[in-house]
Image (cartoon, rainbow, N blue to C red):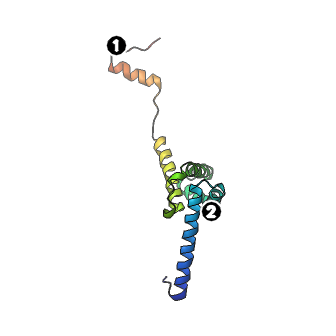
Amino acid sequence: LFIQGADAMNFNEQARHEYECNVDLATAVRAGDTSAFNKVFQQHFDKMHRFMTKLCDDEDHAADLVQEAFLKFWHNRSGIKPAKGLRNYLYMILLNLHRDEKRCQHISYISTDRINEFAARQDPDVREED
């Protein structure tokens, strides 16, 4: 689809206006404006929730991750670069949370009994205590 003439001008004006509003919103959140944060939350929560539900196949868990992403977003608001846009920043936080969680799921835990067994095999002076 190619937009020409007056429609292209209207589209460009609308896109510029939307961009400027997003920059203003990002700037306000960065400055600590809670009403701006609430507006961002309302604008993005549902889309982020649908996206995360597709990744983890669990609506409740997806909602938890999205809420955690918004908490991180608020706590790290000084890192917001208004000209870069909020959407990418929010999704980056969300995907990093998801990746961190997946990484932690791959860590296996070894019981102290198994550690003692291994140590005893490696060093004959190490004995299990009775």
Q: Is residue 21 left or right of residue 127?
A: right
* Relative image position of residue 40 (x, y in whole percent): 61, 60
Cα distance in 3D space between marks 2 and 1: 64 Å
Residue that badge 2 annotates: 43
| Label 2: how many Cα within 10 Å (few below 14, some 14–19, many 20+) | few
Q: Earlier in the sequence, mark 2 or mark 1?
A: 2
Q: Nearer the viewer, residue 114 or 66?
A: 66
* Relative image position of residue 47 (x, y in whole percent): 59, 61
Q: Residue at x 38, y 23 (%)?
A: 118
At label 2, the amino acid type is Gln
Instruction: Count up the numbered dots.
Output: 2
Q: Nearer the viewer, residue 74 or 114?
A: 74
Q: Residue at x 53, y 55 (%)?
A: 55
* Relative image position of residue 81 (x, y in whole percent): 49, 59
Confirm whether residue 92 shows in the render: yes
| Label 1: how many Cα within 10 Å (few below 14, some 14–19, many 20+) | few
Mark 2, secondary structure of its residue: helix
* Relative image position of residue 129 (x, y in whole percent): 45, 12
Q: Could you say which quadrant of the image residue 28 lies in?
A: bottom right
- Outermost residue to the bottom: 5
Confirm whether residue 50 shows in the render: no
Residue that badge 1 annotates: 125
In the rendered view, would you say 83 is above or below 115?
below
Q: Could you say which quadrant of the image residue 20 lies in?
A: bottom right
Q: Nearer the viewer, residue 90 or 63?
A: 90
In the rendered view, would you say 127 is above or below 25?
above
At label 1, the amino acid type is Asp
